[in-house]
Image: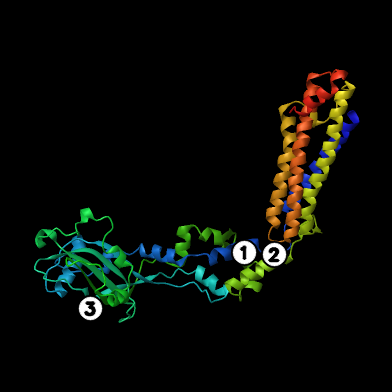
Amino acid sequence: MSDMLKSARNWHKFGFVVSATAFLLLLAPFKVDYSQALKEAHILSSLNMDEYQKWARGFIGQNILLPQYPEIGWAEWEKDIAHFLSLHLDFPVTGSPNWDITSIIAYEHAPTNGVMADWYSWVNSSKPASYYNPDWSTARLSASRDAVGITKPPVVRHFLLRASEWHRFDKEYSFRAYVEMDEEHFGGTSSTSASKITTPWWKPLDELTSRDLFEKHGQTALDPNKFIVEGDAGSALKPIDAKSGIRQWLESTGTWSKLTESSDAGEVVLPGMRKNWSELHDRSLGDAIAFMEQKQKDIQDVSLLGLTVPGQLCVIAIPLSYLVFHLFLLLDVRAAQRCLVQQQWLGEPVAWLGVYDDLASVVVTGCSLVILPVALSIALLLRYSQRVPSYSIKIAIVGCGGALIVGIFAVHSIGTIRKRIKFGQMVNPKTNDEDEDAADSSI
């Protein structure tokens, strides 16, 4: 039995050598590695410019886009639209509507049709965005649905301002006021009472463009107490806050730190790409990504202590090596277990941590036979997943799974031997079969 445990100890030592090799291969650098550059390229391709517009609009107050009158003042800007509409209609308008105001933003668009050199300049740009401020002196109104028999002041419930599709002016706005008769003055009990409405009547109409609403004039489900006033207004370009550039936006979202790297010479933008700039600077973003991904597949080898190690060997050999040494280790410990039961003799103690009963030895044995092999094998699979053929990954997965299962059985059998050695259990030869079954079920 001692010879069998000594053999198991040697296989365990071999496992430590395999784990050390796997760890070195995991840290070994690729001869050419585009991983960081690809990460930067994918970040650029996934940037959502709608989010940038939303961020830039945060510097603009919606009251800036509304018509202002000195006699009203900034403190009561909600009344501006009512005042404005009253000036253009034959009756006074009251109310404090809710607002749906979307400003038109002008900014440096991403160079989607440019090359990587253009992307580099764009990322570094601190040029502030601008917005188009409506010129209400050019505003022109048109009633989409006229109210019949207006004798009392109507109430503005909702006001919409967004880019117009009519293009009467350059970068013009389209505005729309949803107005209804004030029930208190109108003398009716119409269904327009806000307290009885769960979905505002203007909500589905907001989704219609001015052109659609014009073409469907007379088809909207409005009762005589409701009507819509809409029109367009030109605009003038004005700068936003100086801190509303592309670079500031990237910094505010935490993306900037993913695209830069600090060095003794200062901050380097797109450091991964800069390492291979001669190959990438004149390529489009999509072409650069395709080029780097292909290079990753072509260049699989790593440099280990000055030696070139093929990537497929790293992926396949390590899990299979674990599987082989686990199998031979299991054979030895199972044979030692049977010998221990049948011979009723423990022999001299074996200097192997696998059968030591202290906590540290038990933990090291379990980790070295199960946790460490699986963790290192999975780490290698993830590192090479985009570099080696799929069949190599499949073989490695089978080897890793087999090594895990056999390793668990080996740990189980070692635990049985450890318990018998610790407690010095003797077996009755007449009950060998029953004892062996009990040994198999021990931990």
Which residue carries the number 3 mark? Answer: 140
Circle 3 packing at 10 Å, graded few (<14), some (14-19), many (20+), is some
Q: Identify the mark at residue 10; answer none if there is no mark.
A: none
Where is residue 127? Give x, y as percent.
43, 70
Tell which of 62 and 344 is nearer to you.
Answer: 344
Cα–Cα gap, marks 3 and 2: 60 Å
Front disc: 3 or 2 = 3
**Which residue appears at 48% of the width and 62% of the height?**
250
> In the rendered image, which quarter is residue 108 located in?
bottom left
Q: Is residue 36 above or below residue 172?
A: above
The first of marks 1 and 3 along the sequence is 1
Q: Label 3 amino acid?
A: Arg
What secondary structure is marked by label 2? helix
User: In the figure, is residue 172 to the left or right of 261?
Assistant: left
Q: Label 2 amino acid?
A: Gln
Q: Is residue 100 above or below residue 328?
A: below
Front disc: 1 or 3 = 3
Q: Identify the mark at residue 296; answer none if there is no mark.
A: 2
The first of marks 3 and 2 along the sequence is 3
Q: Are the two marked residues, 2 and 1, in contact with CB atoms closer than 8 angstroms?
A: yes
What secondary structure is marked by label 1? helix
| Residue at the extreme bottom | 168
Where is residue 356? Give x, y as percent.
78, 27
Q: Residue 348, can we see it?
A: no
User: In the figure, is residue 88 to the left or right of 64?
Assistant: left
What secondary structure is marked by label 3? strand
The first of marks 2 and 1 along the sequence is 1
